[in-house]
Image (spheres, rainbow, N blue to C red):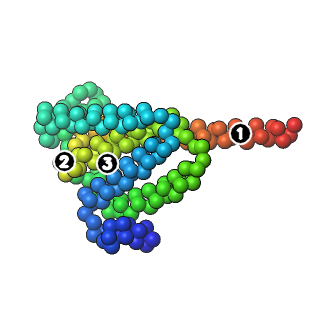
């Protein structure tokens, strides 16, 4: 209820369930991009993330331009035993989903990230290289997806992996998935560092 009320107030009193899924997806994507750019501009150790973001977005859009021009809608072309080019116009929100509460969840997540941002701003916190790279990949990927929805009304998917894959991807999807993998790796590194710090502290106490 709280999340739904927050989302409704952000949309001028319109209930989340009444907002078209396409509009929910556009607003949610814009919110995610905005908060990621905020973090990167404030906490990234350099400005290389801008080049990574623009490069991923440009590569994604160029690949979709080639697919739409040279690969007919619905056609499938085998590239190798594990990869096929399959042009699909995807009106769903992401990975074929039509989750009606996407905007509410996104607003709640962005709100928590903004609260964390306020706590981190007065400190000397800086993002590590893996976290900054992951953020840049996410921004570039989400920009590519949002441009598709704004220009075409759907997302162009064309990469199909495996003999009978349930999903068709694009380069923006892969960038976001790779970013998530990097964040998981970074989280595992932090857990390992905390364990080593505790062991070191225990050794000093015993001595």
* Sequence-wise first label, 1 or 3: 3
The extreme right residue here reads: 207
**How far apart in space, not on screen, are marks 3 and 2 (Cα)?**
19 Å
Q: Determine whether 115 is above or below 166 in the image.
A: below
Q: Which residue is mark 3?
A: 95
In what quadrant of the picture does the N terminus appear?
bottom left
User: Residue 36's x, y, as percent?
Assistant: 42, 47
Q: Residue at x 27, y 69 (%)?
A: 18
User: Residue 199's x, y, as percent?
Assistant: 75, 39
Disc 2 crowd, CA 10 A, few/some/many (<14, 14-19, 20+): few
Tell me if residue 136 can be seen: yes
User: Are dots 3 and 2 in contact, CB under 8 Å?
Assistant: no
Which residue is nearer to you in this view: 116 or 99? 116
For label 1, the SS is: helix
Closer mark to the observer between disc 3 and disc 2: 2
For label 3, the SS is: loop
**How far apart in space, not on screen, are marks 1 and 3 (Cα)?**
40 Å
Tell me if residue 160 can be seen: no
For label 2, the SS is: helix
In what quadrant of the picture does the C terminus appear?
top right
Q: Which residue is mark 2?
A: 151
Mark sitting on residue 197:
1
Rendered image quadrant of residue 195: top right
User: Are dots 1 and 3 in contact, CB under 8 Å?
Assistant: no
């Amino acid at each position: 209820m709280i999340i739904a009320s927050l989302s409704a107030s952000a949309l001028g009193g319109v209930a989340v369930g009444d907002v078209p899924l396409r509009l929910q997806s556009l607003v949610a994507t814009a919110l995610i991009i905005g908060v990621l750019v905020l973090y990167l501009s404030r906490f990234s150790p350099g400005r290389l993330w801008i080049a990574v973001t623009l490069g991923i977005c440009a590569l994604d859009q160029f690949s979709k331009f080639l697919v739409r021009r040279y690969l007919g809608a619905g056609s499938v072309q085998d590239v190798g035993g594990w990869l096929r080019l399959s042009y699909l116009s995807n009106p769903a929100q992401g990975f074929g989903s039509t989750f009606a509460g996407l905007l509410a969840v996104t607003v709640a997540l962005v709100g928590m990230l903004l609260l964390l941002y306020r706590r981190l701003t007065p400190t000397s916190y800086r993002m590590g290289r893996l976290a900054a790279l992951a953020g840049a990949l996410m921004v570039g990927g989400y920009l590519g997806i949002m441009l598709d929805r704004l220009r075409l009304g759907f997302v162009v998917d064309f990469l199909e992996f495996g003999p009978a894959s349930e999903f068709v991807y694009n380069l923006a999807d892969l960038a976001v998935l790779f970013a998530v993998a990097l964040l998981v790796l970074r989280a595992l590194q932090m857990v390992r560092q905390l364990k080593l710090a505790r062991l070191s502290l225990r050794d000093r106490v015993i001595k």
